[in-house]
């Protein structure tokens, strides 16, 4: 089980060996707070501007961070247009080639069989282009493996960070309802945690990340054996029990470089 891969394709290639691998999303590396020279932002604008951008986001000066990006994007787009005569009109246009290169490397490294769902720093419409035959992408659905039922609901919730794959709480609740429609699950797999403060507080970033109240209610009502998730890189608590359900943050794979093992 892995989550928050964030570009770590070399370690991902060594994560096979179990009956199956589950990936809970955030495949792309947009920003590396520990190393500002890495990631999509740094590749576009350089390490110095990336440090400035990280500092603004860390200080919760989100409007200033977006203004910096818009200014840099305009400069980069103008330079690209002058160089090749083509108009570059959006950050997605500028980043598309880097995103595709990262996904190509990541999916080539991802072992088979694997079951995947999306994180908030993902571009879902591109996944089908790079998946292998043994990769099954599930979002608002379920699969039975070895006599156990696994439910999957991907994406993140709307936040001040405006990452690429954020949805409303109502939309996320609809995915959970689709999982429930097939009956109880033994293991519930999501990218984001339930709305439990100790699961949401990042002890290094010193902030509460966004968790789902709909997910918390789903766990209380259906009581799966496990609720597994990622998203919060350094949580105050990695495990919390809700009734009979063991809620577990499977870890920040880019930092640990090792999958989390679940023995059913």
Image: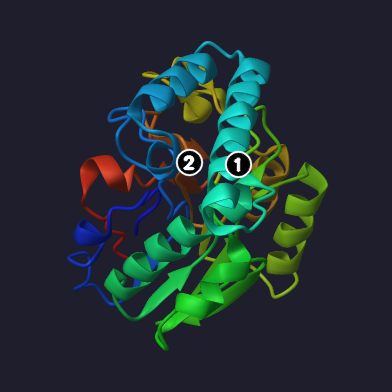
Whether label 2 touches label 1, CB < 8 Å: no
Image quadrant in which the N terminus is located: bottom left
Q: CA distance from mark 2 to mark 1?
A: 35 Å
Please, which residue is most extreme toward the bottom here? 133
What kind of element bears circle 2?
loop
Q: Which of the 4 quarters of the picture holds residue 206?
A: top left
Q: Is residue 224 visible?
A: yes
Q: Residues within 10 Å of mark 2 (few under 14, many from 20)?
A: many
Sequence-first tag of 2 and 1: 1
Residue 68 percent coordinates (x, y): 58, 23
Identify residue for label 1: 78
Left/right placement of residue 213 relative to residue 49 reads right
What number is the disc on residue 231? Answer: 2
- For the point 40% across and 47% down, which residue is it? 29
Residue 255 percent coordinates (x, y): 25, 40
Left/right placement of residue 160 relative to residue 264 reads right
- For the point 45% across and 34% down, which residue is it? 232
Asked if residue 78 is positioned above or below residue 178 in the image, the reply reads: above
- For the point 35% across and 81% down, which residue is it? 113
What kind of element bears circle 1?
helix
Residue 194 percent coordinates (x, y): 59, 39
């Amino acid at each position: 089980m892995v989550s928050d891969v964030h570009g770590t394709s070399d370690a991902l290639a060594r994560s096979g060996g179990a009956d199956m691998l589950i990936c809970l999303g955030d495949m792309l590396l947009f920003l590396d707070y520990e190393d500002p020279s890495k990631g999509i932002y740094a590749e576009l604008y350089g390490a110095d501007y990336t440090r400035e951008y990280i500092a603004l986001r860390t200080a919760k000066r989100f409007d200033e961070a977006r203004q910096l990006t818009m200014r840099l994007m305009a400069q980069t787009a103008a330079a690209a247009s002058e160089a090749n005569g083509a108009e570059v009109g959006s950050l997605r246009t500028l980043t598309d080639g880097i995103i595709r290169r990262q996904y190509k490397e990541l999916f080539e490294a991802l072992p088979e069989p694997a079951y995947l769902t999306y994180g908030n720093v993902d571009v879902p419409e591109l996944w089908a282009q790079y998946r292998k035959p043994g990769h099954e992408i599930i979002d608002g659905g379920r699969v039975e493996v070895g006599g156990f039922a696994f439910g999957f609901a991907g994406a993140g919730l709307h936040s001040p960070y405006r990452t690429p794959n954020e949805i409303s709480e109502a939309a996320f609740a609809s995915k959970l309802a689709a999982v429930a429609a097939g009956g109880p699950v033994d293991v519930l797999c999501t990218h984001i945690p339930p709305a439990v403060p100790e699961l949401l507080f990042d002890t290094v970033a010193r902030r509460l990340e966004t968790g789902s109240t709909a997910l918390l209610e789903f766990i209380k009502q259906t009581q799966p054996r496990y609720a597994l998730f990622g998203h919060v890189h350094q949580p105050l608590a990695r495990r919390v029990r809700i009734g009979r359900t063991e809620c577990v943050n499977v870890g920040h794979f880019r930092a640990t470089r090792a999958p989390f093992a679940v023995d059913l």
